[in-house]
Image (cartoon, rainbow, N blue to C red):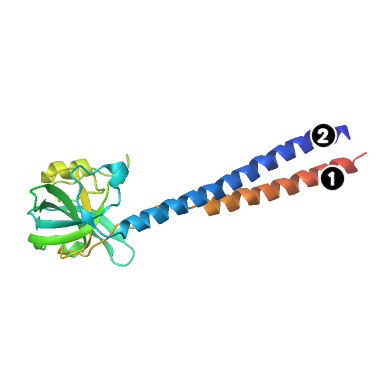
Amino acid sequence: MRRMVFPSLVGGLGLVVLLGLGTWQLQRLTWKEDVLATIESRIAADPVALPEQPDEASDRYLAVELTGEIAEGELHVFWVTAGQGAGYRVISPFVTDTGRRILIDRGYIAATDKGTARTTGPATLTGNLLWPDEGDWTTPAPDETANILYARDLAYMAARLGTEPVLVVARAGETGASPLPVSTEGIPNNHLQYAITWFALALIWAAMTLTFILRTRSKP
């Protein structure tokens, strides 16, 4: 009987840990689903006026309406879409009717349209405020000669186009490109898979522990 104590203790502790991790991932799943629901409702909400001093924490994904004009100047961010392939997001300055100069993500253009002139001038657009979190140490530096960026670097784009570091991603209005509205598609939610993995490991661990104990007991 003594020789059963240690493997039973180890097996029991391992099972508790694995079940605890699976339960934690289920809790995280509920939390993430609430977060995504909040973001989706915020994205689709009726647009409001652009805040005087947009705050990343409180105004992320805020739906806004802009009246003013699309100014001259473009930055092209390399982008790949599932349905249309490789192309670019077009970032331009937008001067509001109150005189503020901000960034507008006009949407997607095909690679073949990179050199095509797009409309500028008066426009009324709706979209969502966004503080992009793109790129890492492996992201290539912008190619200023070819006017190609590989991430929407807010500070860099604002400096290049002489605007506030405020970006609105258009979802409606005449932008001269195909709008790519803000969505939750790029926000990962893998907690269910993680939970299943932990519970499967717990089942395997329990089976291995039980097998070991039974074999040990059968030995003289």
Disc sitting over residue 193 in the figure: none
Q: Residue at x 7, y 61 (%)?
A: 122
- 211 sits to left or right of 95: right
- Looking at the rendered image, the disc whose residue lies closer to the viewer, 1 or 2, is 2
Identify the residue position indicated by label 1 in the image.
214
Residue 216: horizontal and vertical position, in percent?
85, 40
Considering the numbered disc 2 on the image, is that residue within a helix, a strand or a loop?
helix
Residue 151: horizontal and vertical position, in percent?
26, 48
Q: Residue at x 75, y 49 (%)?
A: 207
- Along the viewing direction, whichever of 15 and 23 lies nearer the viewer: 23
Residue 132: horizontal and vertical position, in percent?
28, 47
- Along the viewing direction, whichever of 87 and 66 lies nearer the viewer: 66
The CA distance from mark 1 to mark 2 is 13 Å
Identify the residue position indicated by label 2 in the image.
5
Name the residue type under label 1: Leu
Mark 1 or mark 2, earlier in chain = 2
Q: Mark 1 and mark 2 in contact? Answer it, CB < 8 Å.
A: no
Residue 123: horizontal and vertical position, in percent?
11, 61
Name the residue type under label 2: Val
Q: Is residue 111 visible?
A: yes
**Quadrant position of the N terminus in the picture:** top right
Up the image or down, 188 lies above or below 44; here it is: above
Residue at the right extreme of this rendering = 220
- 32 sits to left or right of 82: right
Mark 1 Cα within 10 Å, few/some/many (few <14, many 20+)? Answer: few
Q: Quadrant of residue 126?
A: bottom left
Q: Quadrant of residue 155?
A: top left
